[in-house]
Image (cartoon, rainbow, N blue to C red):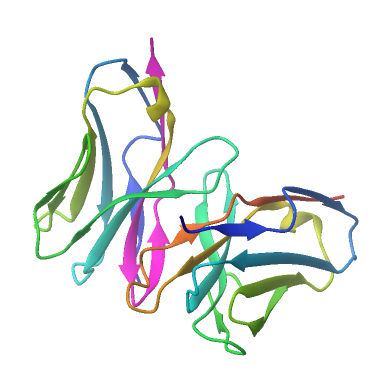
Amino acid sequence: GESVGLHLPTLSVQEGDNSIINCAYSNSASDYFIWYKQESGKGPQFIIDIRSNMDKRQGQRVTVLLNKTVKHLSLQIAATQPGDSAVYFCAVNQGGKLIFGQGTELSVKP
Amino acid sequence: DVKVTQSSRYLVKRTGEKVFLECVQDMDHENMFWYRQDPGLGLRLIYFSYDVKMKEKGDIPEGYSVSREKKERFSLILESASTNQTSMYLCASSAFSVPYEQYFGPGTRLTVT
């Protein structure tokens, strides 16, 4: 089966800096990857996704990078803002079900 | 906007009680999911459903059951609540065409005493 892990449970960055959150997965056949953001007291919110036939995908201030060779993906947030403070989860598609990592809590210092 | 609503934000129940958690989505999604979220364990799938009257076990179904009588509603049932079922419960839905693009409700924090 699939397992998903995150490298750091917490990350603290200065406002305005770039943030990088990492995630590793185990199944090389995984075809779809998603990043979610969960703010305090709320359910996870879809941020961005990437298919396995892509290496990079950009959204608004966010970029997801996929390295299939080492089974690693990352979420980059540009010019991190206080509103970006949340827990970030990566998730991997497994036959229509999602396998989630444990989450990285991002704190933004003013 | 996709909206997934859950019947309660906070719930306190006693050991042995039967507990119903309700979830409703308004996007005509075929797929619905129930997860529990615990510190250090992330989100774990309890049950899911791809259609009305249909259900599939997730990774941790023991102690739970589900009901889907209407497309928009998915209920999670704890037949006899136990203290180890104290957790945050999250409902999600997705379209059949993009099952991995799941939309979550705000969660129900259940405490079993």
Residue situated in front as seen by the camera: A67 or B95? B95
The secondary structure making up most of the magenta span is strand
**Residue A104 counted in the magenta span:** yes
Q: Residue A28: name its quadrant.
A: bottom left
Q: Is residue A88 above or below residue A101?
A: above
Q: Is residue A23 left or right of residue A46?
A: left
State which quarter of the image contains the N terminus of chain A: bottom left
- Looking at the picture, how far across and down is residue B88, in whole percent? 65, 51
Q: Residue B33: name its quadrant.
A: bottom right
Q: Is residue B52 above or below residue A19?
A: below
> Which residue, as the protein is rendered here, is positioned at the far bottom?
B53
State which quarter of the image contains the C terminus of chain A: top left
Residue depicted at x 58% and y 85%: B55
> Which residue, as the protein is rendered here, is positioned at the far top?
A110
**Which residue range is magenta in the image?**
A90-110
- Looking at the picture, how far across and down is residue A53, in whole percent? 9, 65
Residue situated in front as seen by the camera: B97 or B67? B97
| Tally of numbered discs | 0
Q: Is residue A104 left or right of residue B71?
A: left
- Looking at the picture, how far across and down is residue B13, in whole percent? 87, 55
